[in-house]
Amino acid sequence: MGKKVSVAVIKRLPRYYRYLSDLLKVDIKRISSKELSKKMGITASQIRQDLNCFGGFGQQGYGYNIESLYNEIGKILGLDRRFTTIIIGAGNMGNALANYGNFKKRGYDMIGIFDIAQERIGKNINGITIMHMDKLDDFIKENHVDIAILTIPSKNVSEVAEKVTELGVKGIWNFSPQDLHLSSDAIVENVHLSDGLMVLGYRIKEKDLQDEFESI
């Protein structure tokens, strides 16, 4: 890639990947940007612009070869390699993430889970034994860890994130309510699950108001 690709484009790539996967499952071989736009709710022009950021993949008059495009987007997203991953925080969210089977399918190998609560230490989640945080340093030093998933309280998240990145962790997937901004060059993806619910609530409220207006 010769130019910097916007975050908005990058965040759409997993959607393309999912839709193309669905098309492959029903044995569709090719699709035009117009047809894809109808399925995804994105304009055909936007699709072409997004894919052109990576060199484009379509042929005029033919469209996109679905399998080829699916594989290329997978490579762009790093799905042609595997990432070792740990979870810090074995509460409800950490437990749910550890049991999510699609991580492994997408190339993310869970190799460790850590917590400070004594009642959780030694318990098993999806084949992995929960370890105490005092073992974290040695574990990261002894194992190549690419990503740390943080499902811990806001008051601890900055300290823990700085610590693991200093030990060589390359990326943080942060589920705490606090946005992380690290001094290191590690990559941070902040996730706020409630944001999506609030947007949904807004849209329901707007629809109710519109329905009420139309019924007058």
Image (cartoon, helix red, strand yellow):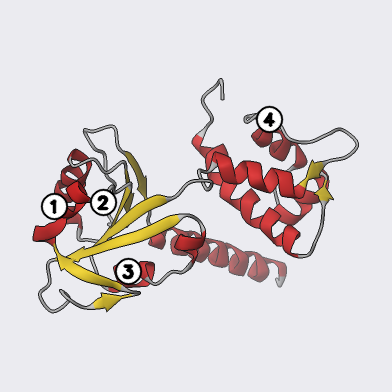
Is residue 160 found left or right of 72 in the rendered image?
Answer: left
Mark 2 and mark 4 lie on one chain; the one further toward the N terminus is 4
Nearer the camera: disc 2 or disc 4: 4
Q: Earlier in the sequence, mark 3 or mark 1?
A: 3
Q: CA distance from mark 2 to mark 3?
A: 15 Å
Q: CA distance from mark 2 to mark 1?
A: 27 Å
Q: Quadrant of residue 68?
A: top right
C-alpha distance separating marks 4 and 3: 37 Å
Check whether the beta carbons of the residues at disc 3 and disc 1 lie within 8 A of each other.
no
Query: To which residue does mark 2 refer?
Result: 178
**Mark toward the viewer: 2 or 3:** 3
Residue 52 got which mark? 4
Decide: is 202 above or below 121.
above
Q: Residue at x 65, y 35 (%)?
A: 50
Q: Image point 20% across, 64% down: which residue? A: 114
Q: Is residue 33 visible in the rendered structure shown here?
A: no
Mark 2 in CB contact with mark 3 (< 8 angstroms): no
Q: Amino acid at mark 4?
A: Asn
Image position of 32 with respect to 22: above or below: above
